[in-house]
Amino acid sequence: MTKIVTHKEGALDKYYIPALIVGLKVTLKQFYKTLFLGQSTTINYPEERREYSQRFRGEHFISVDPQKTENCTACYLCQTVCPADCITIVAGERPEDANPYGVKKEKRPVSFDIDALRCCFCGFCEEACPKDAIKLSRNYELATLNRETAVYDLDHLKREVKGRG
Amino acid sequence: MTTSEAPAKPKLTIDGQAVEFQPGDTIMKAAERARMDGTIPRFCYHPGLPVAGTCRMCTVEVEKAPKLMTACSTPAADGMVVLTQSDRVRKSRSGVMEFLLANHPLDCPVCDQAGECSLQDYNYEYGPSKSHFVEDKRVWKEATTKRLSDKLTLNMNRCIHCERCVRFTEDVTKTHELLMDNRAWRKELTTALDEGLFNDYQGNVADICPVGAITFNDFRFHKRVWFLKEKTGICDGCAKGCSIYADEEKDTVYRYRARFNKDVNDHWICDEGRVSFHTYQQADRIVQPLLTAGSTLNATSWETLVPWFTNELKKARRVLILIGTDASSEEAATIAQVLPSFSSADFVVRSWNGTGDGVRTSADDAPLDHLLRRRDQTSNTRGIEGLGIKPWNEAQDQNFDLAIYFRSGRATLPPSMAAKEIAWGVFSLAEAQRFAAVLPGLSTLEKFGTYTNCDQITQSFETVVKGLGGSASVRKILDGMKLKSNTPVREVAGDTI
C-alpha cells in the first residue's frame, strides 16, 4: 500500500539561506575543525601513511631460508585451493649441487607466477601452504604501469620482506 | 555312482551376502569375483603378483576362527562366514596403520603419490587419529632418495615394506634386480647389481607401489594427480595393443598407466609404450597444413591445401596410396574406398610398416620377451591385413606419378620414389622435408577407431584429447574434398575417424 507523505513548507524553507546552512552543517563543521582546530580527517599520502592491521593481506611473497633458497616445494596446494585461479606453478627437480640440504628440498618450483590482477587476496594460499612459503605482506601499493608487471614471477616473490612488510 | 547333476558351487558369506567361488580361491579372490573387495584394504596383495600375506591389512573375521585371518592368503571354504567390517577387524587395521605411520614421513604435500596413495586412503578410512609414538622417525639420511635406474627413483623413507616391487621383479619380469636388505625397521630396498634395474617393465614398479616410495622419473614432479582426468585408451606402441589409462589435463597427456585386461596385457605395460605419448606432443610435430613452394615447405591453410590435393589427384595418372600399418581400420578402409572416387587415375593401395628392422607383415612379427613387447612397432598390422591391403613391394609396384603416404606416427618412412609424394597423418618436421605437401592428421590419442592386435583381438579406442593445432581427421578432409573445395574444410561438420 502506498503511503503519501506531504511536506509543508515552513519558515526556514521560505528564506533559503537557513535551509542552506542546515544542509551544509556537516561540511561547515569539518571546515571549521580543519581550519581553526587543526583536526584534519584526511592525511597527506604518501608523506603520511595510515596504520593498517597487522593481519592486512597485501602483496605476496615467498619466504626464503638463510641460503636464499625458497621454502616452496611446489606442492601445488595453493594452486589447488586458489578460488581466483591466479597461481601457476611448474615443478621440477632441484639440481643436486644447488641443494644445500641434500634431499630435503629436492622438489622446487621452476616457475611460480601469481597474477595479481586476478588475485582476490583471500589468503587461502597462505593457509594451505605446508611450508609457510607463500605469504601475503602488508604492502598495499600494487599499482603498475602495465599488466605484465602485475604477474609476479619467482624472482619478484623471493624479494626480501622484513617481518610481514 | 554317476550323477547327472552338476555339483553345487561352493559358497561363502561375506558381510551377510552369499558369494559363489571356485575351488582354490582365497577369500580375497572370492570377494574380487563378487566385486566385494572394496571393503578389504590391502598393501602387499596385488592381483597380478603372488600372495605374500605380510602387511596384515586385509585381515577379516572368520566365524569360528579364533584369530583374524588374512583375506589374501586364507583359502575360501564352503559355508565360511566372513566379516570385513566388524569392530575387531577395524581395530586390528587401525593398529596396523598406526605401526605403518610410525615411520612414514608426513610429506604428502611433496610426495607425488598423494591423491592416489593407498596409505592416505586407508588411513582416512581406518587409521587412528593419534599416534602413541613419541620417538623420532626412521630416516635414511644417506640414501633417502636414490636412482634405482634412469627410469625410477626410490625414496626409502616412504617405503612400507610391502615388497610388491621385489615380487614383481621375481615373478613377472623374472629379472630379480630388487631385494630387501637387513630386517625389521632397518629393512632397505636395494638393487642386486650396481647398475640398478634393467628390465623393460620398470614403470609398473612405480604403478604398483602403494605409497610414493618408487616414482617414475618421466612423470615425477610433473603433475599432481588430482588435476588429471583418467581416460581409457590403447597403447599404439607395438602390435600388442595394451590397454592403458591415459591421464590428461587440458588436452595434454601426462602419463600412461596399465589398465587390467586379462586377454592382452594383464596388469602391465612396457616402458617404451608408457612414454610413447611424448611422440605426439613433441614440438616438431606438424600440426598445420604444409605445401611446397619451390624447395621449401610453407605453412598454408586447409582452404588452399584441400583444393590443391583434389587437383593433384585429378591430374595424376597412376597413384600409389600407401597406408601405414599404424592407421586405424576405419581410416584405412575410408581412404582406400573414398580416395579413388576423386579421380579417374589408376589407384594402387598398399600398406607399409618398416618398424623393428623391416617388419612387412604380421608374419615377420615376433615377441621380444616372455611378456608383452613385440618386434612390430605398429598397432594395426593385422587389422590392415584383414582389410585385404597387401604390403608394398618396391620392386613390383613402380611407375607412379603420385604417392600418398598415410600414417599415424609409428610406421617408418617408406623409401623415396620418383613420384610426387604427399604426406598425410602424423609427421615431424624433419621427416616431412621430402614431401610436396603435408596434411596433418590425428594421432591415436586424438581419434577413435579400431585396432586389431597381434593375437587377432580387435579393440576399439576413444578420443582422449583434442587434435593438436590444425590437424584434422580423415573424415573432415574427405568431406572438405567432396564439397568441391569452396567450403572451408574446418566448417564441415563431422566426427573424427
Image: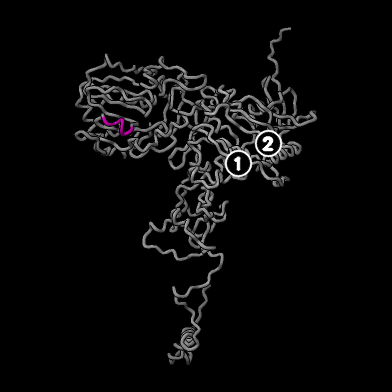
Q: What chain does mark 2 sit on? A: B
Element type at mark 2: helix
Q: Can residue B229 be seen in this view?
A: yes
Question: Taking A106 as reference, is A87 above or below it?
Answer: below
Residue A146: give x, y in percent of width and height.
36, 60
Q: How crowded is mark 2: few (under 14 residues within 10 Å), some or many (20 or more)?
A: few
Q: Does the magenta stretch include residue B430?
A: yes
Query: Residue at left 67%, top 33%?
Result: B40
> Which SS type dominates the magenta stretch?
helix
- Side of B33 relative to B374 (left or right): right
Q: How many labels does the image show?
A: 2
Residue B141: which disc? 1
Residue B101: give x, y in percent of width and height.
67, 41
Q: Quadrant of residue B342?
A: top left
Magenta span: B428-433
- Side of B477 relative to B315 (left or right): right
Tell which circle, 1 or 2, labels the residue nearer the N-terminal end.
1
Query: Residue at left 70%, top 41%?
Result: B98
Element type at mark 1: loop
Q: Do the residues labelled 1 and 2 touch (CB within 8 Å)?
A: no
Residue with the mark numbered 2: B185
Query: Residue at left 38%, top 18%?
Result: B359
Look at label 2 and name its amino acid: Trp
